[in-house]
Amino acid sequence: MRIIGGTWRGKKLADLQGDQTRPTSDRARESLFNLLDNHLRRTGQGWNDITFADVFAGTGAVGVEALSRGAKHVFFFENNMLATKCLKNNTKEISGLTIMGDALNPTKSTPIQIIFMDPPYAKGLWEQALPAFHRAGWIDDNTLVVIETDKSEKAITPQGFTELDRRSYGRNTFMFLRLNQD
């Protein structure tokens, strides 16, 4: 596993052995960040304008990728002890980040620009985390939410959100959501 672009392009990241995590593949992550780059251009923003959350972060590859591209700050949410140890190892020489715990009970916040959720597949965790992040103030109608699921899952657009796009790469499906404007 390596960083695809930005300041740390090519940097190798530690991974956990076994089934503790299921990192997003380099190819899927590259496709995701191409889509995010296009989104930022369309909205007149650059990476240095945004705050990012990597929810169910695992090794932190997606959040580190955002930092490598210049994100102002990245919040990592991970509560598995082994994954958190790996995440801390992968971010030990990097600034501009905060490692937090439980994604199902996030602390209060102001809205951020991009939230990426990659929970263990088929456990209903993103369906619980998304409203929790909304209630805690992380999401407003300018926040882009990206949910990664297994392609075999039939993820339904949650109530109160609009699905902007859905893309599949190998085993991964990315669902791009925005809070409905009321």
Image: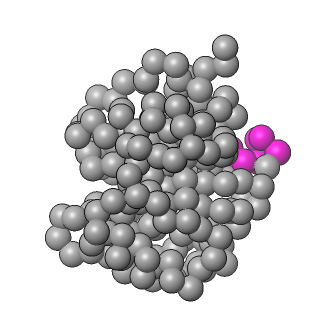
Residue 178 image offset from top left, x and y in percent: 59, 30
Q: In the figure, 151 relative to 20: above or below?
A: above
Q: Depth check: 37 or 68 in front?
A: 68
Give the residue drawn at x 23%, y 39%. Answer: 122
Q: Is residue 169 visible?
A: no
Chief secondary structure of the magenta span? helix
Q: Depth check: 59 or 2 in front?
A: 59
Residue 126 image offset from top left, x and y in percent: 37, 39
Magenta stretch encompasses residue 40:
yes
Q: To which quarter of the image does residue 154 belong?
A: top left
Q: Depth check: 1 or 133 in front?
A: 133
Q: Is residue 51 left or right of residue 151?
A: right
Q: In the figure, 91 relative to 143: above or below?
A: below
Residue 22 image offset from top left, x and y in percent: 28, 60
Q: How many marks?
A: 0
Magenta stretch encompasses residue 117:
no
Q: Depth check: 62 or 150 in front?
A: 62
Residue 78 image offset from top left, x and y in percent: 38, 59
Q: Looking at this view, name the residue that lies furthest to the left.
A: 18
Q: In the figure, 60 relative to 132: above or below?
A: below
Give the residue drawn at x 51%, y 83%. Answer: 92
Q: Looking at this view, name the residue that lies furthest to the front.
A: 108
Give the residue drawn at x 69%, y 34%. Answer: 142
Give the residue drawn at x 66%, y 14%. Answer: 182
| Colour mapping | one colour
Give the residues in magenta: 38-44
Q: Is residue 15 left or right of residue 107?
A: left
